[in-house]
Amino acid sequence: MKRLNRDAITALLLLVLCGVLFRTTFDIREVPFSEMGSEVWPRFILISLSILSVVYLIRSVTHPPPAVQAFSWARWFKTYQNALICFAMFLVFLLALPYFGMLVAGILFVFITQSIIGGFAPKQLLFHAIVSVLAVGGMWSIFTFALRVVLPAGDLFR
C-alpha cells in the first residue's frame, strides 16, 4: 500500500472538518416566519466544499506527489506570487472601502487584480473592465435591491 502524501492527508482533514461543521448546522436556531431556513446556506457551502475536497483527495491519491526540492524564498515567492498579489490587493480594497464605497472599490479591486495577473493588453483591459462591472455591479444590485442589504456607500458619494 502506498503512503498517503500530505495532499491526501489535507483532503481527509478537510472532509472531517466539513463533516463536523455539517453536523453543527443541525444546531442552528430556526428563525420564525422565514421562507428559507438559516441552515440552508451553510449546508450549501459545506456540501460544495466537501465535493471539492473529494476531488482533491482523488487527485492527490491518483497523481504522484512532485519531487521535494530544497526550500528557496525566491521559488516560494514565484510559486505563490498570484495569491500574494490577490491578498495585497484585497488589503488595498479594504482600506479603500470607507472612501470609495462597495460598488466603486469592488469594481476597482476586481479590475486591477485581473489586470495585474492577466496582463495589460488593450483587449484584455476591455475584457477585465466588462467582467468587473458586470460581476461586482450584479452582486451589488442583488444585495442592494433584491436582498435590501445596505452596503457601504463611501465618503466619496455621501
Image (cartoon, rainbow, N blue to C red):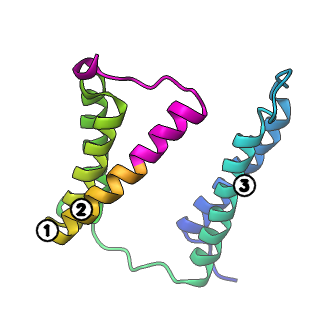
Verify CB contact (< 8 Å) between mark 2 and mark 3: no
Density class for disc 3 (Cα within 10 Å; few <14, some 14-19, many ≥20) is some
Percent of width and height locating residue 120: 14, 65
Count of marks placed on residues = 3
Which comes sooner in the sequence, label 2 or label 1? 2
Which comes sooner in the sequence, label 2 or label 3? 3
Magenta segment: does it hold 111? no
Q: Residue at x 76, y 41 (%)?
A: 40
Amino acid found under the numbered disc labelled 1: Pro
Disc 2 target residue: 117
Left or right of 118, for residue 149: right
Q: Residue at x 21, y 68 (%)?
A: 124
Left or right of 46, for residue 97: left
Residue 47's mark? 3
Q: Secondary structure at mark 3?
A: helix
Residue 14: quadrant of the picture: bottom right
